[in-house]
Amino acid sequence: MKVAIIANSAWYLHNFRLNLAQELQQAGHQVLFISPLDAYVKKLQAAGFEHLNWEVASAGMNPLAELGSVWRLRKLLMHRQIDALLAYTPKANIYSGLALWGQNTVFLPNISGLGRAFIRPSAITLLVVQLYRLALRQAQRVIFQNMDDLGVFTARGVITRGRAVRVPGSGVDLRRFTPSGRLPGDGPQTHFLFVGRLLKDKGAVEFAEAARLLKHEFPALRFTLLGSSTSDNPTAVSAAQLREWKAAGLVEHQEHLDDVRPLIDAADCVVLPSYREGVPRSLLEAAAMAKPLITTDAPGCRDTVVDGDNGYLCQPRSAASLAQAMRRFITLDPSQRRSMGLRSRALAEAVFDERLVIDQYLRLLSHPTPPVAMPGAGISAPVLHPVEGLPTVHVLLAAYCGETWLDDQLDTLLSQQGVNLTVTAGDDASSDGTLQALRRRAATDPRITVTASDKRLGSAAAHFYHLLKQARHCTADYIALADQDDVWEPNKLARHIALARSQGAAGVSSDVIAFWPNGRSKYIRKSHPQRRWDHLLEPPGPGCTFLMTRALALECADWIEQLERSGVGPLPKHDWFIYLVARSSGYRWHVENASSMFYRQHPHNEVGANAGPKAVLLRLHELLRGGYHQQIRHAIRVSRIVAQQRQQPQPPAHLSALQLLRHGRRRRHEALILALFSPFGIRADA
């Protein structure tokens, strides 16, 4: 197959896509590059690849000139008879789709970030959305680097979810970017490094202003900017501004380096306060070199940092928030910094290995077209035979009157990559066609087993408890929970298994993207820092994101039976109960600060996203009437029973208001509200 890789510069292709091209070539494909001319064309040719010149202005806005660029690209592709086109960067993605109109070329665009049109929404944003909608009609699959961007495109109707694929950013070459033996600096000698173009949208201004705030307190701190100062981007930092920062002694500046590794190695912490990214390559390279990271809680950026574990998150567009995150890092001693950096490396190995991205492209080139939807039967995906060496996962799916959404969820379960999967789908005496729909899918896929209740169990928690007890004879490595109405990303399970292994965790959950029938979507963050007694007060996120080791799942099943027999009973919320058992038994739990799924919202949700004013009022009502306090009292009692039997530290029988504030809810404002509503604390049930 003749494969072309296109982007807006040869520099980008050489630095980010050369390894991919070499792997494709080794797999038997003929590979060439397409971009405007620059100094890196010779390096691509020296590496043995043909380069085709495409004339396009990176920041051009003249309609006639841009149409000319599309026409020249179309002639180039037709003349060279390209079989498959892999596109990167916004203009290359859009113009490639327009140029391929009516052609049979395989088109795989990569959405590596949405750019300033989405950072600063305007009338231009609407135009860009329409251009994407038109151009991506030619794409067999559309590749996204983070779930936020994927959510934007599907919510706006640019593409359907069936054509969306997520990869872990650009990936990072773990053989080239490796940790060194350099010891981190100490306290006031800390060296912070920013790697990226000097753009306001990248947070360059916040980086310099944070330096201004901190240098009054710690004069010996170093702040280095590594990146081009000559960009024609409208948000570029001006030359005068850069001179002012340097003259004031706030920052040092390095214009360009062919090899960034020496400067990354010399830094103690790599910082990128960007407003929005795909998944920033600079942070992946730093993570691979075992560097702690500081970045924003923004799309793409948050994927690279587990807050408080391998770095810190700050708020976008806030120099004060960035300075506070840096101050937290300054207080760490060298051994703590070293441990934090090693956790960055572990995350890079588990989630961001470039090999994962390359394997995905090889699969997509072999099978570029998504499975075809059959009327009334969901997607007829091929049944996959077990692959030796892959981890095994048994998914417990609780269904009740979910016929409308079941096929969507089952499609994304059965298409999970990198695992051997089986599903037990339970029907809780549904009054619609849910049971029939489950049996229809099970008849065509032996990985699905269907169970049915003769009478209503009554709640999602009761149903999951029932399924967990049934699964005690399961031999899979991991147990996962699934609702009937969500949409999982293709590598959800594989990514969570990698995180469980790298973090030494028995349970993993994640953030989610809630979406509504009207196209609205909202990122729901659950990855707030864990507190000492937070398991007594809340779950770590929706249970439908949970992945557990078999040992933890079996322990939960045993405790369900023990508590039912004793009359104490498990908690009325299964996700809270599972987290409580895990933490009370001494297991580690990891909450991924990235979304792993789309969390469908509809009038029949039992709980839902708990987002918006209505949810706030409902929670306040629950506090006022005492129902939430009763649940906490029950949770304290159950935790003490579990911890005592497992010989783990028991929570106090009475949590004071101060303990609720300091060690309770993971979000500080919620902890404050609970403490205010509990002036005398909360005591366990008798």
Image (cartoon, helix red, strand yellow):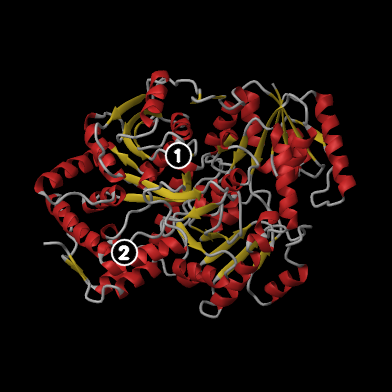
Q: Which residue is mark 1?
A: 492
Identify which residue is drawn at 31% across, 64% down: 622
Camera-side residue of 288 and 95 = 95
Camera-side residue of 647 and 27 = 647
Q: Amino acid at mark 2?
A: Glu
- Could one spot residue 7 in this view of the protein? no
Q: Residues within 10 Å of mark 1 (few under 14, many from 20)?
A: many
- Percent across and percent down for residue 244 are 71, 75
Q: Nearer the viewer, mark 2 or mark 1?
A: 2
Q: Amino acid at mark 1?
A: Lys
- Percent across and percent down for residue 16 are 65, 42
Q: Which residue is mark 2?
A: 622
446 to 184, vertically: above or below: above
Extreme residue toward the front, this view: 431
Quadrant the C terminus occupies: bottom left
- Mark 1, secondary structure of its residue: helix
